[in-house]
Amino acid sequence: MFSNQILKNRLNHYYQLLHNSTLAYYLRCKAIPAAFNHSQDVNELWDIHSRLKQKFEENKMLIPPTIFEKCEGNSFLDLKIELAQRLLKSCEFCENLCNVDRTANQHGFCGVYDESYISSTFLHMGEEPPLIPSGTIFFSGCSFECVFCQNEDISTAGKNYPIQKAGRKVTPKDLADLATTIYNRGAKNINYVGGDPTPNLHTIISSLKFQTANVCQLWNSNFYNSLLALELLSDLIDLWLPDFKYGNNECAEKYSKIKSYWDVLRRNFTYIYEHGSRNIIIRHLVMPGHLECCSKPILKWISENVPEVIVNIMRQYHPAYLVSQEHYPEINRRVTIAEMQEVFSYAEDLGLEFQSVS
Ligand code: SF4
């Protein structure tokens, strides 16, 4: 268990937000003017974005913490909305890099068209204790195909059955209204999850235009985002809750059907450690028989490269979805107590702050 002091140091921005003594990142983005127009070339827009991003990062500690004044005309948030819409036309939200035009009734690996569907929204009491009650919004569809998926009813939407049957269709305004409603009911954060939120990045970013509450925006993801997606998100997200499942590319390809996982995840963790809020809780799900190939390389890499994060080592794995004695029999069991103890003592030897966050 963590001491309160460690939590408050490592999740300092989050705790300040809870006490209303700082401003959510998305509100800061609304306050920054952005001189652009919608007919400009996409490369020009990314150049403007880079310049504003640099300014945002230089000034993020200097902006008056609780005063929000929307700028006149287009803002940095408007520019991000425009860039997300451009990316949707040749989708590169995640490293599957499908490059399909989702605005022209196409979908890629995730099965999600341009419209977003939500399977449920509620105050989640099962997340890490500092996060609860968490205003959790479950998007349908996923950029992975995990054979052991524990949420297959929503994550396989668009693949095993039509996305249109996957819940309620939401516009950015609808999503903002949902976020506002759960915030007013006591949510400490707006928790975007799925499936995975990444295919719905455009809807989420656009919804921020309609949100006004000074509340933490939380990205709860498999973290297979493209770098461009992270560039858009890193000035908007207050708290990161990424998974880190596999310690190599081969296990990821075998069990989640995606390529270059280890390379992409290390790149993405390095990026958000250097940019944005640096308030990060990494979830590592221990898998049976995957200590040497996955758990240990992950923990070692974290300790050497992004040491000032919170790590939640999770024991909830259970065989589900496609896993059986016939298919993937090597993971057709729960993790043993001895395996968990071995992972915990390995993390301890590395000096990591870990375990169930409380
Ligand atoms: S979100 Fe990822 S999986 Fe879905 S279409 Fe875009 S690049 Fe492909």
Image (cartoon, grey):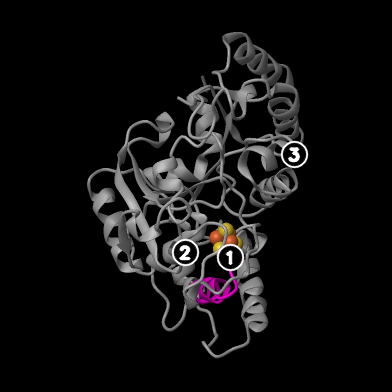
- Precedes in sequence: disc 2 or disc 3: 2
Q: Residue furthest top?
A: 338
Q: Nearer the viewer, mark 2 or mark 3?
A: 3
Q: Secondary structure at mark 1?
A: helix
Q: Nearer the viewer, residue 44 or 119?
A: 119
For label 2, the residue is 28
| Residue 348 in picture, x, y percent from top left | 67, 17
Instruction: Examine the rendering and report whether any part of residue 355 can be seen.
Output: yes
Q: Residue furthest front?
A: 326
Marks 1 and 2 sit apart, C-alpha to C-alpha, by 8 Å
For label 3, the residue is 250
- Precedes in sequence: disc 1 or disc 3: 1
- Precedes in sequence: disc 1 or disc 2: 2
Q: For residue 40, what is the image quadrant?
A: bottom right
Is 193 on the left or on the right of 341, as rendered?
A: left
Marks 2 and 3 sit apart, C-alpha to C-alpha, by 40 Å
For label 1, the residue is 56
The stretch in magenta equals 79-92
Residue 89 inside the magenta-drawn segment: yes
Q: Nearer the viewer, residue 296 or 51?
A: 296
* CA neighbours of label 2 inside 10 A, class few (<14), some (14 to 19), many (20+): many
Instruction: Examine the rendering and report whether any part of residue 287 can be seen.
Output: no
Q: Is residue 62 above or below residue 10?
A: below
Q: Quadrant of ligand 1?
A: bottom right
